Image: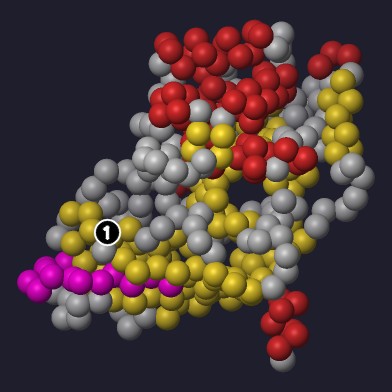
Amino acid sequence: MRNVFLLLPLSAYLLIAAEPAHQRDFTFEYNATVKDIPAGTQKLELWIPVPHDDPFQRITDIKIETLVPYQILPGDQDNQMLHLEINQPRESSVPVTLTFHAVRLERIQPIVFAKTAAPEDDLSRWLKPDRLVPIDGQISTWAHEVVEAAHAATDLEMARAIYNHVVSTVKYDKTGKGWGRGDIYYACDARRGNCTDFHAIFIGYARAVGIPARFAIGFPLPADRGAGKIGGYHCWAEFYAKGIGWIPVDASEAAKNPAKREYFFGAHDENRVEFSKGRDVVLTPKQQGDPLNYFVYPYAELDGKPYASFETSYSYRDSAAIASVQ
């Protein structure tokens, strides 16, 4: 057992990490081609997320392959992005390849209550609604029902009650339509979906009971070391507990693997790479279309209007796999 929770007086909690954090060292390749650009287009703009450093991942050796001038620009929430602008494009397609080296650490949050813990400067932004995660009367009612049924009082107790509720009542199921948008009302009604839907409920309910919570998105890597293609994104969440700090959760992975339900309340494994934070994302320079629901895939505008004709592929290679073929 890697993590042990002890229920202590005065809402004090302790997470014991029995083993040192794991680490993953790999290269990542992100390919995107804007295709079928209509003749007569006056301006093409393309944005691609670029992963950033944080305490749990180190990004180096970023390389961009394209025939078009580009910039890597900072954005909100410590995000950064590749931006290309082409006036009167002559070609019908524009390929771009982003490669980088990453070292990702397993994140196991020591959950220790301490009255002297320094608070964040401004947590109010993480209590605000998103377009698809409103904090209205109905969401607030449902969230309070969950925490009251668990007799939860502290931030940590309430977050744990919400996490248990989501993991127990939502099925990881990507069939049919409606899943994948992180629409809290869809997820609460259908009780199924992917990681975006799971974390829409967790984040929405947490905010509704006064707990700051935030969203992050990137790509998953198979646990087995090696190399290969990646089919799509993965997302996860954090919440802020007073006196403790930011605590990681991954409700969808817990639902997929019940044996790791305890682990994923307070941990993110090393088998992931984060590309951006937040929802309702405003790009740099600002797009003319609506804020993006989330930002992990490329986004383009032709003459100021969203354009979605892309070919994409994503792949990884662990450093051990690289060494074995040299």
Q: Provide the residue span drawn in magenta.
A: 31-43
Asked whether 159 or 277 is in front, the reply is: 159
Whole-percent x, y for residue 221 in the image: 63, 61
Q: Is residue 271 visible?
A: yes
Which residue is at 47% across, 24% downward?
Answer: 188
Element assignment for label 1: loop
Left or right: residue 305 compared with residue 19: left
Q: Quadrant of residue 53?
A: bottom right
Please rate how many residues cluster around mark 1, counting C-alpha atoms within 10 Å: few if below 14, some from 14 to 19, many from 20.
few
Q: Is residue 321 left or right of residue 144?
A: right
Q: Quadrant of the N terminus?
A: top right
Across and down, in percent, residue 323 comes to 74, 84
The residue lying at 82 percent from left, 53 percent from top is 21
- Res 250 → quadrant: top right
Number of marks in picture: 1
Q: Residue furthest front?
A: 175
- Asked if residue 36 is among those painted magenta in the image, a careful observer would answer yes
Q: Return the x and y of residue 96 as percentages of the image width and height.
A: 38, 75
Q: Which residue is mark 1?
A: 308
Left or right: where does residue 280 sit relative to residue 61? left
Horizontal and vertical percent position of residue 303: 14, 60
Give 229 or 71, whichever is nearer the viewer: 229
The residue shown at (58%, 43%) is 236
- At horizontal 33% and vertical 72% (from top left) the residue drawn is 33
